[in-house]
Amino acid sequence: MESNNRFDKEYEVQYEQHWEKLQQALDDDNLEGFRSEFLDMHPYDQAMFFMEQEKAIRLQIYTYLSPEEIGDIMESMDEEDTQVLMAEMDPRFASMVLAEMSADNAVDILNELEKDQVASFLTIMDKEAAEEIKQLLHYEEKTAGSIMTTEFVATYKTYTAQQTMQQLKEDAPEAETIYYLYVLDKDKRLVGVLSLRDLIVANENTLIEDIMSEKIVAVSVGKDQEEVAQMMRDYDFLALPVVDFQDHLLGIITVDDILDVMEEEASEDYSKLAGVSDMDKPHDNAFVSARKRLPWLIILLFLGMFTASLIGRFEETLNQVAVLAIFIPLIAGMAGNTGTQALAVAVRGLANGDYGKQGKAKLVMREACTGLINGIVCGLVITLVIYLWKDSIYLGLLVGISIAATLLVATLAGALVPILMERMHIDPAVASGPFITTINDIISILIYFGMATVFMGFLT
Amino acid sequence: MESNNRFDKEYEVQYEQHWEKLQQALDDDNLEGFRSEFLDMHPYDQAMFFMEQEKAIRLQIYTYLSPEEIGDIMESMDEEDTQVLMAEMDPRFASMVLAEMSADNAVDILNELEKDQVASFLTIMDKEAAEEIKQLLHYEEKTAGSIMTTEFVATYKTYTAQQTMQQLKEDAPEAETIYYLYVLDKDKRLVGVLSLRDLIVANENTLIEDIMSEKIVAVSVGKDQEEVAQMMRDYDFLALPVVDFQDHLLGIITVDDILDVMEEEASEDYSKLAGVSDMDKPHDNAFVSARKRLPWLIILLFLGMFTASLIGRFEETLNQVAVLAIFIPLIAGMAGNTGTQALAVAVRGLANGDYGKQGKAKLVMREACTGLINGIVCGLVITLVIYLWKDSIYLGLLVGISIAATLLVATLAGALVPILMERMHIDPAVASGPFITTINDIISILIYFGMATVFMGFLT
């Protein structure tokens, strides 16, 4: 998209000017000049500038900024960039930075380190911050507990609107979000929720319990992050409270963290469909990339060998009618394509919770019919083309019928495999494209050579 | 995940109780009973209940609820469900419902209808609402303009904090979000932004221009929605202002709409990778599904025929050494798998903006090296296996070298195709798995039979 308004244009110009001034200040070792330019930028832009620099320059910048300022930058960074920083910072400085960050983000960073590294960071860290982080470190990765923050605003149901507003003014600078206030009873159990909007329009002397909503949607601390994201999307909340089994409020999950979760989960499903278990990072070198992809390729290689040995059993047939070999990739390819289509539809549908128990049976039925329709259409087309090309109606019929049967079975397999995996409590997204393609290769070859044996008399 | 806290359990129990009471009220035609139960639920749950009912029951429910109440339900619905409702509601009632919805969501619904239907809805609609909707209808689908809402809170830079707070209390019930306030000059141009948090902690008599931020991040009205989502994720905003080319504030985009955009775009990339241009809906029947998938399958069928005709050229070779045919699916399959992996990495990376100009050259280099490493490893494995299985070192070498060369070229192709597509201003995600698989089929067969001609003397 072209930039056609002042903000886009100004933004770019500002950006370049900032950049130049910052480089100049670094060259001149001008601390004040650097700080005034740098702190004027959004943390995301600060992070972009920071990661563009050589390591030597970054070491210079650390001496210019406070741990809190570095913490702000790290909150805007990708996981891999934060790891670069953690490795190059002085450990004492790094622990001060972590202490200044919001606890949930600090935990994300620590979760990527070795256990003894984490322990040593926590030892030298400010005690209060370390306590908060230790609590969050207990929670399993990818659960509500691991993405929640403990910096929320709570009030009591016996407070008035004015008292709460006063409390809020004090808490606001620290809190992750102030747009929802959580209402506790005297045992600190969550009993209500109040949006800032409701507080603002309320009369000053109103009691919180009279304006709070008791229809709380909360998640338990062990809930899967993908389900949390789904809930947030469905209910359009900006934040969700996280509670333990006794309804004590442990933390909140804010929508900005959910945006990252959604991006992460979408990337994950996408890579699984492509058969890349762990997506390559932009900075990975070829050896790292190769190591990530090889396991899949080796498995598929052996499955492919199995396919080859299947065809090997029909070597005699091939020796008699070599022309049969010509259509092997076509039939196997079509089986793979249609299977991947059906797979994607089923995996996406299951992830979105589109299909109930009855829905799944209906899905399988529909895929069977879809496979049949597609099979008949493609089969007719190919029979005609081969008849015109090779002038053999029998060869045409053999390939056409094989394609029709293959498409039916392959489409069905594409839908059934993820459903069965879900029933076995395996994430259906693991049923990747290459996997279903290889299964369908095998199916298609059995069908094709099975048919060929039937047609043998007409072909030789 | 098991529900192990009061909220999850209570929620389910509440849910079932609601459900039963609602059904009972409908059976008894008890309007008051129905309303008090129904309006006690979250709109998302209302929508779930509503769509579970038969059409006849839904027609009964329409008579129980006001257009505004139906509007709230529709805001929580999927696109396809809203279309069902639009088709079955009385047009006059439907236009009243649309008028009550927030304009951006009403436009989303209208965008799915025929032009003359839209025109007739707008004619019978409340004038003010119709005007607002007409303005938004101008904007192209999937741009910032089409997802923005015009219900924002604006203030002027010469106001005090107290005046603004007063204004806010009036606007709050209507506004889509009150957590950012947009500051205008006397020509109604956007000159600053203020978070509600800053307003709350400010002194009552402070002027807005003294506390507002002038570092505005705004998007132009024609910007692609995917880029808007990216910006929101990077900068962690809850809302983004949308301006025209003269910096007039046209509307805002809130984070809850962005969650839907991200879900939509992720689904789209996922389906493209699988070669399903338009994802099947759960309610689609087999004919609709088949029609959506057939175009791709037919294209791939003809590409497959091309592959077949390529092999046909080597029929003589195949007649002499039928065993060659055995390994065709293995080699083509490996090419497809490795190509899809490289494709997914490149498409994801390009979508995330991970690669600059230099980055792309580096990516291609890395993929070449990755392909080489994977090729050598897989080639060695397969040579060994075939040597042991078929007791022919020459056949092993032929297949091994072919696999090595194929993996190198196919990996490179997987990375190059999306990069070239991006350069030609085509969405790289269009380079789907089946497409790259078919290209790689062709490459692999040329390499394999090319090699076979070299090895011919040793094989017969």
Image: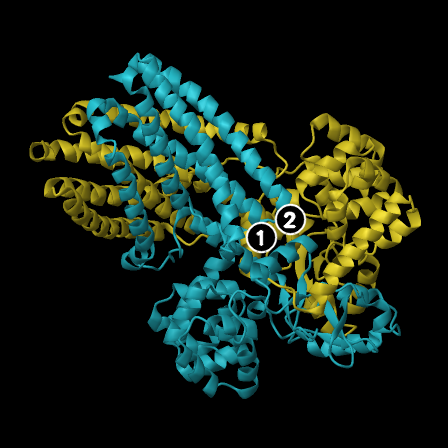
Chain colours: A cyan, B yellow
Quadrant that contains the C terminus of chain A: top left
Q: In the structure shown, which secondary structural element does the residue marked by tag 2 occupy? A: strand
Type of amino acid under label 2: Val
Q: Residue at x 28, y 37 (%)?
A: A310
Q: Position of residue A271 (x, y in %)?
A: 43, 51
Residue named by callout 1: A7
The crowding category of the residue bearing disc 1, from other C-alpha atoms within 10 Å (few below 14, some 14 to 19, many at least 20), is many
- Kindly indicate whether the residue at mark 1 contacts the one at mark 2 (C-beta within 8 angstroms): yes
Q: How many marks?
A: 2
Q: Is residue B390 above or below residue B2?
A: above
Is A157 positioned to the left or the right of A338 in the image? right
User: Any mark on residue A182, and which?
Assistant: none
Chain letter belonging to callout 1: A
User: Any mark on residue B243, and which?
Assistant: 2
Q: Position of residue A256 (x, y in %)?
A: 59, 62
Q: Nearer the viewer, residue A293 or A295?
A: A295
Chain letter belonging to callout 2: B
Residue B430 shows in the view = no
Q: Nearer the viewer, residue B218 or B120?
A: B120
Dividing the picture into quadrants, the one containing residue B279 is: top right
Q: Position of residue A224 (x, y in %)?
A: 57, 62
Q: Residue at x 33, y 33 (%)?
A: A445
Residue B29 shows in the view = yes
Is A155 positioned to the left or the right of A287 in the image? right
Cα–Cα gap, marks 2 and 1 = 9 Å
Q: Residue at x 65, y 38 (%)?
A: B139
Q: Nearer the viewer, residue B157 or A373?
A: A373
Type of amino acid under label 1: Phe
Dividing the picture into quadrants, the one containing residue B71 is: top right
Q: In the structure shown, which secondary structural element does the residue marked by tag 1 occupy? A: helix
Q: Is residue A287 above or below residue A167?
A: above
Is A154 positioned to the left or the right of B336 in the image? right
